[in-house]
Amino acid sequence: MRITFAPWGETLAELADVSRRAEAAGAEVVWVPELHRSATLSAAAIAQATSTAQVGTAIALAFTRSPMVTALEALDLDELADGRFILGLGTGVQRLNEDWHNARWGKPVGHLRETVRNLRHFWATCTTGEQIDLDGEYEPMRIRGYERPYPVRRTEIPIYLAAMGPAMTRLAGRIADGWISHELCSPSYLEQRILPEIDAGVAAVEGRSRKDVELVVSACCSVDTDTAAATRRVAGLVGFYASVRTYADFFEFHGLGEQQQAVIDAFRSGRGADYLADAVTDEMVDALTLNGDFDRVAEQIAEYDGLADAVKLSAPTHGIAASETRAAQDRIIELIQRITGGRQ
């Protein structure tokens, strides 16, 4: 099982430095999100700061760029990273796409399927001058008179899809090179809700096997010799997601429906989504995050072995000071070093 890492930095320079340190500690992939920064620009900074770890987006928004822009950015990033780039894509939610980005939403499964098709077709043909004529309900692509004059590092860049619901998870099993979980994903949820859908997607394609899809589980991680402090540090992140009613089935699965409702009530009383830690119980934190001293967190990571192919570790960021996030991140890098022995 691969140990991978999602760095945090107040500046791009810090993000690059943290990524370099994580690579030296043994992280096999460094992942960057898209919300407060552009995923592709963050990936560019990291690609130039590292030399051996893969560089991935987890995730870039699939519908807020045209497929051609996404394809071009991925080619450029793969060149910067010398063939180490992974394009992780996700749909985001309807409100974010339509209200924040004025982007078309459509039916997300079909929309994402056409987007992935266009990316792969463009990469395969962009240097040949071949006409592209792809029909589609959401992303038709018709290109004439185009020929990329620059060399392409790879024509088959890995595409990983973020998915939580059954239909999108099956799509990842059918067409993606990898699947990336939501930030909260327990071993039991992975085993009982995710793996059956991945397997169903894989089985729908002749000649495809489970080995063709790398499963990357995301895990927010808080390491501290003071185990109570470790637990409370990550409570804000749990509160942030618990405030979203869309995740009701997820919390119900873990027997935390009533506790989620208490968080929602606190949110509706006027608290910001980043400041709900005191409404989150230790039971919620223990069920959904990695927290405790080094040995305990290492044991929690090991619970994914045999279920996931990789674990993506990230530090808590919600409702705590930057200095706390920075300290938590330093401990994760130390944990990676202890688990992997570092890069030789």
Image (cartoon, rainbow, N blue to C red):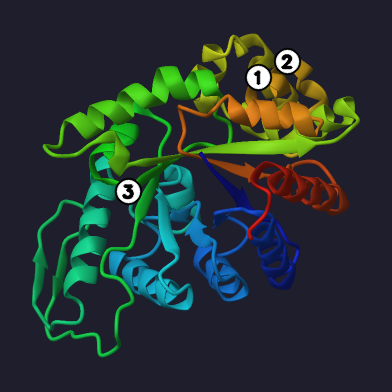
Nearer mark to the viewer, of 2 and 3: 3
Whether residue 143 is visible: yes
Residue at figure coordinates x 14%, y 54% from the top left: 136
Quarter of the rendering containing residue 38? bottom right
Of callouts 2 and 3, the N-terminal one: 3
- Between marks 1 and 2, how big is the CA–CA gap? 6 Å
Residue bearing mark 1:
287
Which amino acid does the dot numbered 3 rest on? Answer: Asp
- Between marks 1 and 3, how big is the CA–CA gap? 28 Å
Residue at figure coordinates x 36%, y 73% from the top left: 75
x then y, percent, for residue 106: 28, 46
Q: CB atoms at circles 1 and 2 under 8 Å apart? A: yes
Numbered disc 2: secondary structure = helix
The residue closer to the viewer here, 96 or 133, is: 133
Badge 1 crowding class, 10 Å Cα cut-off, few under 14, some 14 to 19, many 20 or more, is some
Residue bearing mark 2:
283
User: What is the residue that sits farthest to the front in this orientation?
Assistant: 344
The residue closer to the viewer here, 5 or 68, is: 5
Badge 2 crowding class, 10 Å Cα cut-off, few under 14, some 14 to 19, many 20 or more, is few
Residue at figure coordinates x 58%, y 67% from the top left: 42
Tally of numbered tags:
3
Which amino acid does the dot numbered 1 rest on? Answer: Ala
Of callouts 1 and 3, the N-terminal one: 3
Badge 3 crowding class, 10 Å Cα cut-off, few under 14, some 14 to 19, many 20 or more, is many
Numbered disc 1: secondary structure = helix
Which amino acid does the dot numbered 2 rest on? Answer: Glu
Using residue 265 as the reference point, say whether residue 6 is left or right of it. Answer: left
Residue bearing mark 3:
177
Quarter of the rendering containing residue 8? bottom right
Using residue 59 as the reference point, say whether residue 235 is left or right of it. Answer: right
